[in-house]
Image (cartoon, helix red, strand yellow):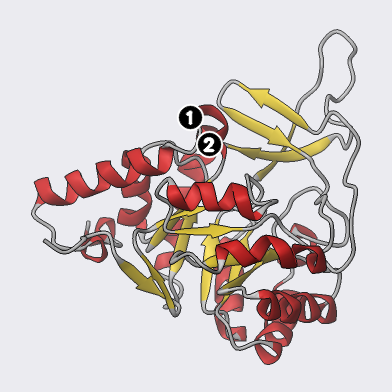
Amino acid sequence: MANPLITQFAGLNLSNPTMLAAGVLGYTGLSMKRVIESGAGAVVTKSMGLEARTGYGNPTVVQTDCGLLNSMGLPNPGIRHFKEEIQELNKLAAPTIFSIYGFSPEDFAEVAQIAVDLGAAAVELNVSCPHVKKAGAQVGSDPSLLMDIVKHVKKQVNKPVIVKLTPNVTDITEIAKASEKAGADAVCAINTVKAMAIDSETCRPILANKYGGLSGPAIKSIGVRCVYDIFDSVKIPIIGCGGISNWQDAIEYMLAGACAVQIGTAIAFQDITVFKSVTEGMTKYLEEKGYNSIKEIVGLAHKF
């Protein structure tokens, strides 16, 4: 029997619809190779820009009752330093998607070109990080600026362009529609939700940056709702992300309209075996329900 999890979207071919989310284990080629060998259908790198960034000082991560709150500040060595890391990944069958950021449309286009030259199968635009000034969600919540960024990148590279959307807006469907109108090949919903934590003893915000992005089970229902809303607003593929910890979560996102899912925070609590358990559970679900392909369940919840 053919693998029912094989899927294609936006010009990408995946052995299964699970992907490593940006920001987790995406710093080195070796760590991402381990994720692929553990069952992920694709990997997304840590977000990278033109120049190196040290990020924020500690503390940068807080564990909550139902997820993680982080404010890293986009630390990275600069995209040019990723040349050696990508070499081993390009030998594997799973696509490597480069998460990139910039401070202007021209920045994004230049980083995208370098990413493609290094071997990126696609680029994911980080226009949704909730805690970096003049980048991330600050540009991704402005439809006009976002469209300018997407157009610059699409004009610069000939690889699929994915826009990772912020949930920290009044209407995420407007941002998704702007992405599609500008030529994006897919959108990913959602990035982390802007949040904070305060220490009751010291009376101070815990994160050095005060505000951070909440991920994990706490935001899964928000992500599912966003995917469900976007599904009726655009025709381009949607990647679901946010709080996926098991195969039931992944199926829920796909029923809402996602054609693939990204997993990040669950790795911190379960390790990289989560990809194997999710794909095995999805396969069993399809068999028991009588579906021949994972594509058959995408958006089924919209029939009701």
Image disc number at residue 267: 2
Instruction: Give x and y (percent) for residue 32.
Output: 57, 52
Number of residues whose C-alpha sits closer than 10 Å to that of mark 2, classed few (under 14), some (14–19) or many (20 or more): some
Separation of residues labelled 1 and 2 (CA atoms)? 5 Å
Image disc number at residue 97: none
Q: Amino acid at mark 1?
A: Gln
Image disc number at residue 270: 1
278 sits to left or right of 240: left
Label 2: which secondary element? helix
Which corner quadrant holds the N terminus?
bottom left
In the picture as drawn, the residue positioned furthest to the top comes out as: 201
In the picture as drawn, the residue positioned furthest to the bottom comes out as: 155
Instruction: Give x and y (percent) for residue 17.
Output: 37, 58
250 sits to left or right of 50: left
Label 1: which secondary element? helix
Picture layout, residue 155 above or below residue 122: below
Q: Are marks 1 and 2 in contact (CB under 8 Å)?
A: yes
Instruction: Give whichever of 288, 145 is nearer the camera.
Output: 288
Instruction: Give x and y (percent) for residue 61.
Output: 75, 31
Q: Residue at x 44, y 60 (%)?
A: 229
Q: Amino acid at mark 2?
A: Ile
| Number of numbered discs | 2
Residue 127 appears in view: no
Residue 215 lies in quadrant: top right
